[in-house]
Image (tube, rainbow, N blue to C red):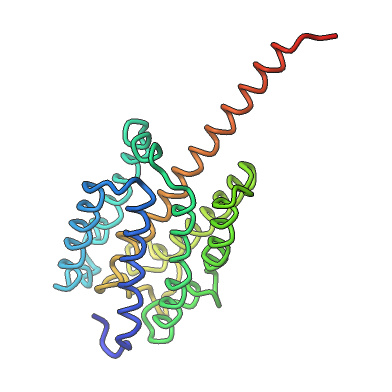
């Protein structure tokens, strides 16, 4: 763990990780294999971080690729029709939307990590990180879905907007880390993600948020296409006077 950092920051972040996993689990039909996979992946990355594996940043290829590459591969596999269909079949869209509220405590944690010199200012809401907007609006959108007052068009727009926010800060976070291709934050690099429990931000929280947006967008666009197709059939079948 990061020396000198208040314990409540670590606890808040760990609770945020747990909330992310639990919400994703319940939003996707309570699949036991999915939960087991999350736990196994989280434990593996936590053990590596606790033992200082990611604190060595001058290797080629960089050790951090063992976080980014597997997470990216798992997301791609999860978006393949075979696996995506299984998840979306039992998708609770209200819960999958409420999942994005975890971005609010993440922003609080990042702000305190900045204060303690472990991330650059650009990763906070005082810098380039506007991701808190998605976290604050997620409960509102979730309520609209639950009360059946959210249109397909509105949900597509919100998910696309929120996805852009998280991808923007993801790339800024990577490019401000102590990696061979670092572009930002040279005076105060993004070091926090090399430590436990913050390794779970790029390993678990961000991939889960990104995947949820992508899979919800695919489902929403598919529904929109289906509705439009049915409308065309209905119009063509209607007798003209």
Please tell me how many numbered marks the rendered image carries.
0
Residue under the point 36% across and 54% down: 24
Residue sitting nearer the eye, 159 or 119: 159
- Left or right: residue 239 versus residue 24 is right
Question: Compared with residue 219, is residue 123 higher up or lower down, i.e. above or below?
Answer: below
Q: Quadrant of the C terminus?
A: top right
Residue under the point 38% across and 41% down: 90
Q: Position of residue 237 (x, y in %)?
A: 69, 11
Q: Position of residue 166 (x, y in %)?
A: 48, 59
Q: Quadrant of the N terminus?
A: bottom left
Residue sitting nearer the eye, 229 or 106: 229
- Left or right: residue 42 versus residue 193 is left
Residue under the point 42% across and 83% down: 112
Residue under the point 21% across and 56% down: 41
Question: Compared with residue 220, is residue 63 higher up or lower down, i.e. above or below?
Answer: below
Question: Compared with residue 167, is residue 231 higher up or lower down, i.e. above or below?
Answer: above
Which residue sits furthest right?
A: 241
Residue sitting nearer the eye, 29 or 219: 29
- Left or right: residue 96 versus residue 134 is left
Q: Position of residue 143 (x, y in %)?
A: 56, 57
Q: Position of residue 198 (x, y in %)?
A: 31, 71
Which residue sits furthest front?
A: 147
């Amino acid at each position: 763990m990061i020396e000198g950092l208040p314990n409540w920051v670590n606890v808040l972040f760990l609770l945020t990780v747990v909330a992310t996993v639990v919400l994703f689990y319940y939003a996707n039909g309570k699949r036991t294999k999915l939960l087991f996979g999350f736990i196994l992946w989280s434990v593996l990355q936590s053990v590596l971080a606790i033992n200082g594996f990611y604190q060595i940043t001058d290797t080629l290829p960089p050790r951090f690729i063992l976080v980014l590459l597997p997470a990216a591969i798992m997301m791609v596999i999860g978006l393949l029709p075979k696996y995506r269909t299984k998840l979306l079949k039992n998708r609770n869209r209200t819960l999958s939307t409420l999942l994005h509220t975890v971005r609010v405590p993440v922003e609080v944690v990042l702000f305190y990590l900045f204060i303690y010199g472990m991330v650059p200012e650009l990763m906070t809401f005082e810098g380039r990180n506007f991701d808190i907007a998605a976290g604050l609006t997620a409960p509102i959108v979730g309520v609209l879905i639950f009360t059946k007052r959210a249109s397909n068009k509105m949900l597509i727009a919100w998910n696309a907007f929120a996805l852009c926010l998280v991808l923007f800060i993801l790339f800024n976070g990577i490019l401000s880390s102590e990696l061979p291709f670092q572009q930002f934050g040279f005076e105060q690099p993004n070091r926090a993600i090399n430590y436990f429990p913050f390794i779970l931000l790029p390993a678990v929280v961000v991939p889960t948020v990104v995947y949820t947006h992508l899979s919800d967008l695919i489902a929403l666009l598919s529904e929109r296409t289906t509705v439009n197709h049915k409308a065309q059939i209905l119009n063509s079948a209607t007798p003209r006077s």
